[in-house]
Image (cartoon, helix red, strand yellow):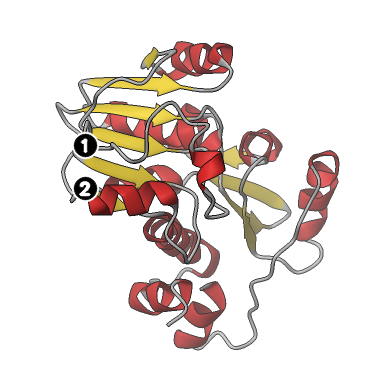
Amino acid sequence: MHNAALRAVGLEGWRYQLLPVAPELFAPTVKALSGAGFRGANVTIPHKQAALALADETSEAARAIGAANTLVFEDGRTWADNTDAPALLAALPFPPSGRTALVLGAGGSARAAVWALLDSGAREVSVWNRTFERAVALCRELGGTPVRDPVEADLLVNCTPAGMDGSQQGVKSLPLLVDEPTVFRCVVDFPYTRAETPLVAAARRAGLAVVDGLDLLVGQGALSFQQFTGMAAPVDVMQLAARGR
């Protein structure tokens, strides 16, 4: 997706690459990237909170969320931002103001979702996590209500990796029946994969509005691209590349 965008804007000397990094190697790897010629990096599970802690400067949103997914390196310093939050809001089919939401998960993406929804005026944001204490801790920091069981809401936001491999088994570990998603008006599934996740498939069968992981991937990636390059992102190009077209 990013390499297609770089070609589209004429930055032929630039390259975007995957860097798998174990948690214990994350800090030294990030500190070495600038000297190795990197302009920036996107950060995903499980490094988003660690990325914020490593930064010299941070955006207001990243500080409030407590997690970063975008790092930019300049003059030996690291800038951290969170583009998950604005990407989520831009992708929603209706504004969250006055609405209710159920967020699944308590990691970096969940933190971005809870903060974005509350900051945009959501009436109630409930948070479920397999470890209830993590949901309690997240809500204590950001707001929202921790729940042990699912609640009806206008919006369901899955920020867990369940279903990313396309199997029903992982999704069935979530606190809802994916075959009966009609207690929601819209389903957002953060895991990104070109194949439909079981949750997205069930929501579409039920006729619900759906925001899938690739919608969010492109949205946050376009915002990161602008920070990396200083150029407007060719969103259409990125969308086609992300979906393998």
Is 70 left or right of 39, judged from the image as shown? left
Residue at 37% of width from left, 59% of height from top?
Answer: 215
Is 196 left or right of 202, judged from the image as shown? right
Residue at 44% of width from left, 36% of height from top?
Answer: 112
Residue at 39% of width from left, 42% of height from top?
Answer: 85
Identify whether 162 is placed above or below 173.
Answer: below
Identify whether 90 is placed above or below 185.
Answer: below
Looking at the picture, tell me which residue is in the foreground, 197 or 190.
197
Mark 1 or mark 2: name the one nearer the start of the chain: 1
Looking at the picture, tell me which residue is in the foreground, 244 or 230.
244
What is the x, y in percent for residue 236?
Answer: 34, 76
According to the image, label 1 marks what residue?
182
Residue at 47% of width from left, 11% of height from top?
Answer: 140
Q: Is residue 46 visible?
A: yes
Three-letter amino acid code of the residue under disc 1: Thr
According to the image, label 2 marks what residue?
206
* Circle 1 SS class: loop
CB atoms of marks 1 and 2 within 8 Å: yes
What is the x, y in percent for residue 113?
Answer: 39, 35
Three-letter amino acid code of the residue under disc 2: Ala
* Circle 2 SS class: loop
Looking at the picture, tell me which residue is in the foreground, 189 or 37.
189
Give the CA distance from mark 1 to mark 2.
Answer: 7 Å
